[in-house]
Image: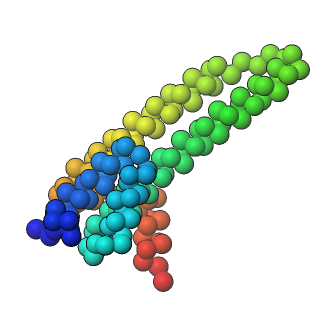
Amino acid sequence: MQKTKLGISIALFGASLYFVGLFGIFPLVILAGYVLLFEANDWLKWTAIKAVAVVLLFTIISSFLSLIANSTSLLNDIVLLFRGSFDISALNRIISILRTVISFIQTLILLILGFKALKLKNVKIGVVDKTITKHMYEE
């Protein structure tokens, strides 16, 4: 079994990258940075980049939902400024449901990827894998 320079297996370290991604981007970037700077195993490097990419993808999706919510709030404030009436509560409920669904999907995907990584396996995520391949291996 191949080990990292820290002495743990690359499978366990790869899984920990995905599991740490459940706690946020900052601790994940620190671990991924360590892998990219100090580890030589290509699978582990791929896993580090993929973990960051998956978390960033869901962060971007969540940011777009926030942008929609903020723009409707702005529209509501403008209408209220002129003493108009504009009800956005239904849209806010939909966005709240979407945020919950996105968070659930992110957690599920990171858990699946983490448990697969324990066996040195990978789950393909189309747009993420294509983007990583394009930017890592294209000359």
In screen coordinates, is 75 left or right of 46? right
Q: Position of residue 92 (x, y in %)?
A: 61, 25
How has the structure been colored for display? Answer: rainbow
Q: Position of residue 17 (x, y in %)?
A: 31, 55
| Quadrant showing the N terminus | bottom left
**Residue at the bottom extreme of this rendering:** 139
Q: Quadrant of residue 105?
A: top left
Q: Residue at x 36, y 49 (%)?
A: 21
Q: Is residue 41 above or below residue 116?
A: below
Query: Which of 112 and 49 lies nearest the eye of the viewer?
Result: 49
Q: Position of residue 109 (x, y in %)?
A: 34, 46
Q: Residue at x 65, y 36 (%)?
A: 68
Q: Is residue 54 above or below residue 71?
A: below
**Residue at the left extreme of this rendering:** 1
Q: Residue at x 43, y 74 (%)?
A: 136
| Count of number-bearing discs | 0
Q: Is residue 123 above or below residue 58?
A: below
Q: Position of residue 112 (x, y in %)?
A: 28, 47
Is residue 30 among the parts visible in the rendering?
Answer: yes
Q: Residue at x 47, y 72 (%)?
A: 134
In screen coordinates, is 18 left or right of 13? right
Is residue 46 among the parts visible in the rendering?
Answer: no
